[in-house]
Image (cartoon, rainbow, N blue to C red):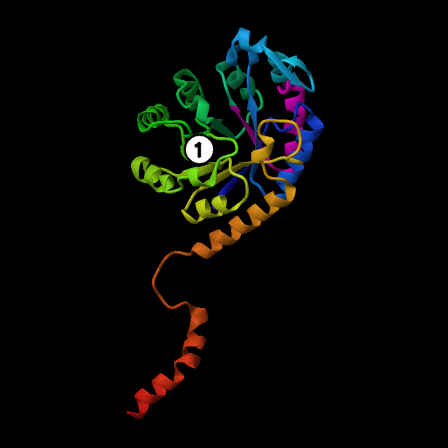
Amino acid sequence: MGIFIIAEVGINHNGDVSIAKDLIRVAKDAGCDAVKFQKRTVDLVYAKNFLDSHRESPWGSTQRAQKEALEFDRDKYKEIDNYCKEIGIEWFASAWDIEAQIFLRQFGCKYNKVASAMLVHKSLLGMVAEEKKYTFISTGMSMPEQIDQAVEIFKRQKCPFELMHCVSTYPMDDEDANLNRIKKLRDRYQCNIGYSGHEVGLSISYAAAALGITSLERHITLDRSMYGSDQSASLEPMGLKMLVGALRKIEKAMGDGEISVQPKEIPVSKKLRAHIFESYQLN
């Protein structure tokens, strides 16, 4: 199996299920394997004084108005679930609290995701691991001992997982990518390693693919100028198509690493080395 490509819709739908569907279609048309959302129980994730504080947004003048507007309810997620089944693409979501994880269970998604911010939430990790679904675990903002703890929870529950190298800045500066950490994670944990990127552009994702990642997640948007904190670090439709196409080429190009003559090289060798072989025969 090649790199599992995840198009992170996240909250870039801006609370509009029609935009969410457009983004799902973009991911499907580009050749992605899955789309991912985020689910929060607003009153559990954010403190009351924060929610009551000022924030101007298209939905009002408080943080609560903005946060609640970005959360889909059961009916909207059911619409998303039906649409994904209709066009043939997997979907799943990262829960930011226990109630959100319980909410997501009703849809029977094939995969789970642990966001970097949630890697230290032991109760949530235990609940996710109990489901025994293949889980992608992002490792941004995390020290080795924190990753050790998360890995131990999933191993104890015998839940299949892979870690994803991630740098939790939005957008991430190129010099902060630290892609060599992919190999360090693979060596330390002896498991599949993916990459969750927040950079602008495609080059770093290409480099990650060449380092042998098994999954890649990038945020997507219809237009980077749209409202939202994640839009600037997201790929527009054409960029996503370019990414997927290049990743599939990189997969083919990596090969098995064997030092040998390829069958297609044999006739070329005979032609370009003919004068050498002929001189040997004359001698």
Q: Is residue 144 above or below residue 60?
A: below
In the picture, measured across the screen, residue 73 lies left or right of residue 156, that is right
Is residue 73 rendered magenta in the image?
yes
Residue sitting at 30 percent across and 87 percent down?
Answer: 280
Under mark 1, the amino acid is Val
**Farthest bottom residue in view:** 282
Exactly how many numbered labels are in the figure?
1
Nearer-the-camera pick, 120 or 133: 120
Residue sitting at 46 percent across and 30 percent down?
Answer: 168
As helix, strand or loop, the secondary structure at mark 1 comes to loop
Residue sitting at 69 percent across and 26 percent down?
Answer: 17
Q: Is residue 131 visible?
A: no
Measured as percent of width and height from the top left, residue 110 is found at: 52, 30
In the picture, measured across the screen, residue 51 lies left or right of residue 57, that is left
**Crowd class of label 1 (few under 14; some 14 to 19; many from 20; radius 10 Å):** many
Measured as percent of width and height from the top left, residue 163 is found at: 40, 33
* Quadrant housing residue 255: bottom left
Q: Is residue 129 visible?
A: yes
In the picture, measured across the screen, residue 8 lies left or right of residue 154, that is right
Check the picture and name the quadrant holding the C terminus.
Answer: bottom left
**Farthest right residue in view:** 18
* Quadrant housing residue 87: top right
Measured as percent of width and height from the top left, residue 229 is found at: 58, 27
Residue sitting at 56 percent across and 46 percent down?
Answer: 243
Measured as percent of width and height from the top left, residue 89 is found at: 60, 37
Span shown in magenta: 69-94
For mark 1, what is the residue? 167
